[in-house]
Amino acid sequence: MEATFRLARYVSGLGHWAEVTVHVTLADQAEVVVGEEAFAWLYRVYGPDATTQGPAFDEVKKEAVDGVRHALQALSAGAQPVRVLITEIHDTPVDTNEGDVKFAAAHAVWQALGHEPEHRPWIREDGVVVFPE
């Protein structure tokens, strides 16, 4: 099962933009993996000299993994474990803010699984992304 979720909103003049694609398969145990090509889109946009390494990319990957884990925690107890491969992570230097990639990753997983969580994350009026516990 594959799904892409794009977050594209402005809240109080603050941009929130991220797009995450995941591929979800049944597994013996839960697993979250960031694919080797998660940032390959940068080469298509900026050419062969684009970089996909460094602290900023590590932070974006961490947010995506955190979003997937948040989504999996919202599944009902006893649900079949899944392996989630994060195949693409898109962000922007201007309109992607803290929590945006996590938000998009969580929603992509729920979309792939056809799951509607009881408590969804939201963006407060001040632009802060909130994840319910």
Image (cartoon, helix red, strand yellow):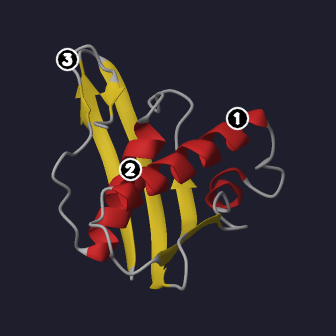
Q: Indicate the quadrant where residue 130 lies.
A: top left
Name the one closer to the observer, 22 or 29.
29
Residue depicted at 73% across the width and 67% down the height: 36
* Image vertical order of residue 111 relative to residue 65, above or below: below
Q: Residue at x 76, y 50 (%)?
A: 52
The first of marks 1 and 2 along the sequence is 1
Q: Position of residue 87 (x, y in %)?
A: 57, 68
Secondary element at tag 1: helix
Badge count: 3
Q: Which badge, 2 or 3, comes first in the chain's sequence?
A: 2
**Measured from the top left, where is residue 93 in percent x and y?**
57, 31
According to the picture, the residue beneath numbered tag 1 turns out to be 56
Front residue (pair 106, 60):
106
Instruction: Give the residue drawn at x 32%, y 45%.
Output: 7
Quadrant for residue 15, please give it.
top left
- Secondary structure under tag 3 reads loop
> Could you tell me the amino acid type at mark 3?
Glu
In the displayed structure, 19 sits above or below 29; it is above
Q: Label 2 vs label 3: CA separation?
A: 18 Å
Q: Which mark is residue 104?
A: 2
- The local secondary structure at tag 2 comes to helix
Asked whether, in this view, residue 115 is left or right of residue 2, the answer is left
Q: Position of residue 120 (x, y in %)?
A: 22, 45
Residue 90 in view? no
Residue under label 3:
125
Mark 1: few/some/many CA within 10 Å (<14, 14-19, 20+): few
Disc 1 to disc 3, how far (Cα)?
A: 26 Å
